[in-house]
Image (tube, helix red, strand yellow):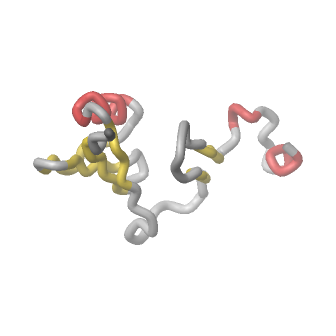
Amino acid sequence: MARLRSLGITSTEDDPTVLVEPAGPGPRLWFQLVPEAKTVKNRVHPDLFAADLQAEARRLTALGATVRGSHPDHLVLTDPEGNEFCVFPAPDTP
């Protein structure tokens, strides 16, 4: 909280960082808002998996993503800042 207060942020709801914890096994992802605009290619290109590819595309576009490409086995999207990521159908699990 001291770091946030030093930035003029008094509520955790206004924190420009987000930590996404996995529901099960998987990586923790941390995102941070930075003042500078994107100027080069992404350093990280996440691939996401969804049980229903089209439903997930609708959910993501409602949150601000843009579908940039549709392929037989995946979709390419960008977030509102132009960062690219892909969504694949979830693999069948036994």
Farthest right residue?
A: 2
Query: What is the quadrant of the C terminus in the image?
Result: top left
Can you tell which quarter of the image residue 65 is in?
top left
Q: In the rendered view, does 11 fall on the left or right side of 79? A: right
Q: In the rendered view, does 30 fall on the left or right side of 60? A: right
Query: What is the quadrant of the N terminus in the image?
Result: top right
Write the residue at 32% across / 40% down: 93
Farthest front residue?
A: 94
Q: In the rendered view, does 87 fall on the left or right side of 28? A: left
What percent of the width, then of the height, locates residue 51? 30, 34
What percent of the width, then of the height, locates residue 73? 16, 49
Q: Which of 92/47 is in front?
A: 92
How many marks on residues?
Answer: 0
Q: Which of 21/25 is in front?
A: 25
Q: In the rendered view, does 11 fall on the left or right side of 89? A: right
Can you tell which quarter of the image residue 22 is in?
top right
Is 35 placed above or below 64 here? below
What percent of the width, then of the height, locates residue 43? 45, 69
What percent of the width, then of the height, locates residue 69? 18, 50
Is 33 placed above or below 37 here? above
Write the residue at 62% across / 44% down: 18
Q: Which of 60/81 is in front?
A: 60
Write the residue at 25% across / 36% down: 53
Q: Which of 56/31 is in front?
A: 56
